Every structure is written in structure tokens, then in C-alpha cells.
Amino acid sequence: MKSQLKNKLHAKRIFARCKYSNCEQNKKANSFFEKQIKLIKEQIKELVKSDKDLDDRVKNITTAQGIGFITAVTVISETNGFCMIENQRQLTSYAGYEPRQNDSGTFKGKTPISKKGNKYIRAAVYLPALSAARWNEHLKRVYKRLCISKNNKKIALVAVARKLLILIYTLWKKIKSLMYITNMAKTKAST
């Protein structure tokens, strides 16, 4: 809703003369939405900080270049903390990043992503993928290589988004295994 209001204000400023009261109402509504978004983000941060394990994992995930707090929390919440996900292939399938075959007989069509998965995960990872393709050195090389070989930037961006999603999953699992090893060492030391 905030984006819609922002776009309306921009259109009225650029293309048409708007009545002063109408523009002011839109500005007030826009500032209200900004305050609500800020409040919700603060509540999410408080909720994450209340659980020490979750806070450590989110901090570990956000150390990766291109992944922010809201992206990490969105992916974690949409997958329910990866509790039903056993491997990377399951995760990419759940998010809808697996290829869909478009072949029939002798016809060989393009193979797009299936998009049958969770659209909220794909939406949460899209903009970080744009950022990572520009600033993360490893993903930047992947993006450039795929842009040259596939001759399509969207395909390369989807591949970067998929890699970011797998990176989030790996960092989530890594902190879990590190915590398990630490707890085992503490148990052995106490006995």
C-alpha cells in the first residue's frame, strides 16, 4: 500500500496538477504506513532477540554479503525454520526454483522455473540477488558467466537467487552443527 501511494504521489507531481488537499492526504497516509512498517520491523527484531538460538542463527546468516535481516527472517519463517527440509534440492523445489520441462515429442521448448513453490521466498530473495550479483564477488562471477552463456540476464539472476537461498540454508545448518559440537564438547568436559 505504501508503494501504491508513493507511485500515485509521483504520478500526480509529474503528470497532472493535483489538488493540494488530495496530495496532503496521500502524504499523511504514506507517512502512516512508513511508521507502521518501522514498528513491525522493530517488533520482529525484538521477537528474534528473545530467542538466543534464533538470534545467533540470523546473525550468522546476515554475515553473508547481500542477505539482510528481513530476508533471513522471511526465509526462515516461510520454511518454518527448515524443519521439514532435508536437503538443498528439497528447498529449491519448495521455493519453486527447480526447472520445469517444456518438451513434447520432438518439440523442445525453454525450461523456465516451475513457480509452483513459495512465492514469498522468491520475492524475499529477488532483490538481495540483484545486490549480490553486483557486490558479492563469487556470485558476481556466476552472474557474469551465466549472462554470457545463456544470453539472458533473468536466467542468471534466478540462478543467483537460488544460490543465495542455498547459502541461507547452509548457514542455518552450519550454526546448528557448530552448536551441537560445542554442546558435545561441554558434556565431555563436565564428565
Image (tube, rainbow, N blue to C red):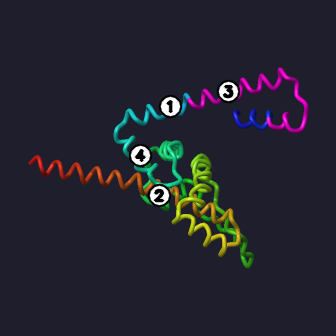
Q: Which residue is mark 2?
A: 167
- The picture quadrant where one finds residue 109 is bottom right
What secondary structure is found at the residue carrying circle 2?
A: helix
Is 13 within the magenta? yes
Q: Main secondary structure of the magenta part?
A: helix
Is 181 within the magenta? no
Q: CA distance from mark 2 to mark 1?
A: 25 Å
- How many badges with numbers are in the image? 4
Label 4 near label 3: C-beta < 8 Å? no
Nearest to N terminus: mark 4 or mark 1: 1
Q: Which residue is mark 4?
A: 59
* Residue under the point 58% across and 52% down: 128
What secondary structure is found at the residue carrying circle 4?
A: helix
Q: Which mark is residue 55?
A: none
| For residue 173, side relative to residue 145 (left or right) | left
| For residue 115, side relative to residue 163 (left or right) | right
Q: Pointer 3: residues within 10 angstroms few (<14), some, or many (20+)? A: few
Tell me where the magenta segment starts and ends, as one range: 10-38
The residue closer to the viewer here, 141 or 87, is 141
Q: Residue 2's x, y, as percent?
A: 69, 33
Q: CA distance from mark 2 to mark 3?
A: 35 Å
The residue closer to the viewer here, 32 or 87, is 32
Question: Which one is in front in this view, the residue at disc 2 or the one at disc 1?
Answer: 1
What secondary structure is found at the residue carrying circle 3?
A: helix
* Amino acid type at image mark 4: Lys
Q: Residue 177's x, y, as percent?
A: 31, 54
- The picture quadrant where one finds residue 133 is bottom right
Q: Which residue is mark 3?
A: 31
Q: Which residue is mark 1?
A: 42
